[in-house]
Image (spheres, grey):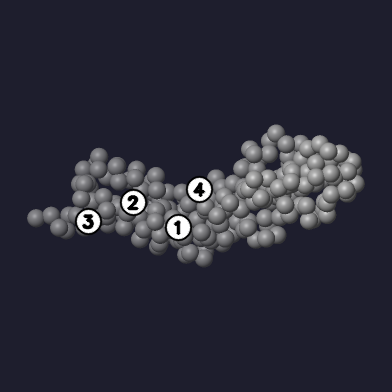
C-alpha cells in the first residue's frame, strides 16, 4: 500500500492518512514524524497496525495527563479509568500497560506523592482519623507501605488524632449537652464516622464533658 495523501484534521492536531487514494486511518501528528509517514511511502499491514496501536496509547496518555491536570490520581485510579475506556479495544490490557509505562517514565504516576497530597489536603481542609484516611487510600489502591511512610512523615499518631478530634468535636459543643446520653452518642458516632478510634473518642468525650461541667453555674 502507498501513502497517497496526508490531511490535517480541523483541530490541526491529528492527520488523516490516505492509502491507495482511500482514507485509511487518523493518527496523532507526532506519529507522522515518529514513523516517517510521507506521501508515496510504501507501508505494509503490520506497520499500519503498529501505528494504530501507538496512536491509541498516545491518545490515552494525553487523556490521562489531562485528568491529572485536574487533580492528582493514584495508579489504581488510572488503571480503573483505562480499563473502562479501553474495554472495547483489541489487546486492551497491553495497551493500558503501555500507557502506564509512559506516564511513569515521565513521572506522572507516583503513588507515594499521591498519598502525601491526599493526606495533606485532608489534614488541611477535612480532618479525619487514621482509620478513615487509610480506608480512603486503600480504596485508591495505594499500597500499605506507602500509606505507612506518609503517616510517619506527617506524624499521624495518637497525639495528633486526639488534637484533631478534640477540635472537630469542640465545634459541635454549642448544639450538644454531653450530660445527655443521646448527645454523647451523637458525638461518638460523628467522630467514629470521621475515622477516629474508640480510645481517642472516649478521651475527647471525657475532656469535653469535664470542661462543660466546669463552666456550668
Q: Residue at x 83, y 38 (%)?
A: 21
Q: Is residue 210 left or right of residue 100?
A: left
Q: Which comes before the other along the chain, label 3 or label 2?
A: 2
Q: Which comes before the other along the chain, label 4 or label 3?
A: 4
Q: Do labels 2 and 4 touch, CB within 8 Å?
A: no
Residue ID for mark 2:
202
Residue 101 is situated, as x and y percent measured from the top left of the image, at 72, 54
Residue ID for mark 3:
210
Q: Do labels 1 and 3 touch, CB within 8 Å?
A: no
- Label 1 to label 4, Cα distance in Å? 13 Å
- How crowded is the residue under tag 4: few (<14 C-alpha within 10 Å), some, or many (20+)? some
- How crowded is the residue under tag 2: few (<14 C-alpha within 10 Å), some, or many (20+)? some
- Label 1 to label 2, Cα distance in Å? 26 Å
Q: Which comes before the other along the chain, label 1 or label 2?
A: 1
Q: Tag 4's secondary structure?
A: helix
- Label 4 to label 3, Cα distance in Å? 33 Å
Residue 181 is situated, as x and y percent measured from the top left of the image, at 24, 41
Residue ID for mark 1:
121
Where is 158 relative to 41, above or below?
below
Q: Which comes before the other along the chain, label 2 or label 4?
A: 4
Q: Do labels 4 and 3 touch, CB within 8 Å?
A: no
Q: Tag 2's secondary structure?
A: helix
Q: Which comes before the other along the chain, label 1 or label 3?
A: 1
Residue ID for mark 4:
136
Residue 39 is situated, as x and y percent measured from the top left of the image, at 84, 49
Q: Residue at x 27, y 45 (%)?
A: 184
Q: Do labels 1 and 2 touch, CB within 8 Å?
A: no
Q: Nearer the viewer, mark 1 or mark 3?
A: 1
Residue 183 is situated, as x and y percent measured from the top left of the image, at 25, 43
Amino acid at each position: 500500500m502507498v501513502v497517497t495523501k496526508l490531511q490535517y484534521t480541523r483541530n490541526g492536531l491529528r492527520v488523516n492518512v490516505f492509502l491507495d487514494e482511500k482514507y485509511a486511518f487518523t493518527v496523532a501528528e507526532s506519529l507522522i514524524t515518529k514513523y516517517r509517514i510521507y506521501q508515496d511511502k510504501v507501508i505494509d499491514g503490520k506497520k499500519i497496525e503498529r501505528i494504530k496501536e501507538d496512536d491509541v496509547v498516545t491518545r490515552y496518555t494525553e487523556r490521562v495527563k489531562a485528568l491529572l491536570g485536574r487533580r492528582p490520581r493514584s495508579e489504581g485510579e488510572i488503571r480503573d479509568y483505562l480499563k473502562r475506556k479501553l474495554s472495547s479495544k483489541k489487546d486492551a490490557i497491553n495497551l493500558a500497560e503501555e500507557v502506564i509505562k509512559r506516564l511513569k517514565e515521565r513521572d506522572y504516576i507516583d503513588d507515594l506523592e499521591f498519598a502525601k497530597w491526599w493526606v495533606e489536603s485532608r489534614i488541611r481542609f477535612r480532618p479525619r482519623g487514621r482509620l478513615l484516611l487509610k480506608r480512603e487510600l486503600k480504596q485508591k489502591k495505594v499500597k500499605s507501605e506507602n500509606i505507612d511512610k506518609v503517616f510517619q512523615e506527617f506524624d499521624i499518631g495518637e497525639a495528633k488524632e486526639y488534637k484533631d478530634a478534640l477540635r472537630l468535636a469542640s465545634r459541635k459543643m454549642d448544639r450538644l449537652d454531653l450530660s445527655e446520653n443521646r448527645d454523647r452518642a451523637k458525638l461518638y458516632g460523628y467522630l467514629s464516622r470521621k475515622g477516629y478510634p474508640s480510645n481517642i473518642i472516649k478521651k475527647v468525650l471525657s475532656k469535653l464533658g469535664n470542661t462543660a461541667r466546669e463552666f456550668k453555674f
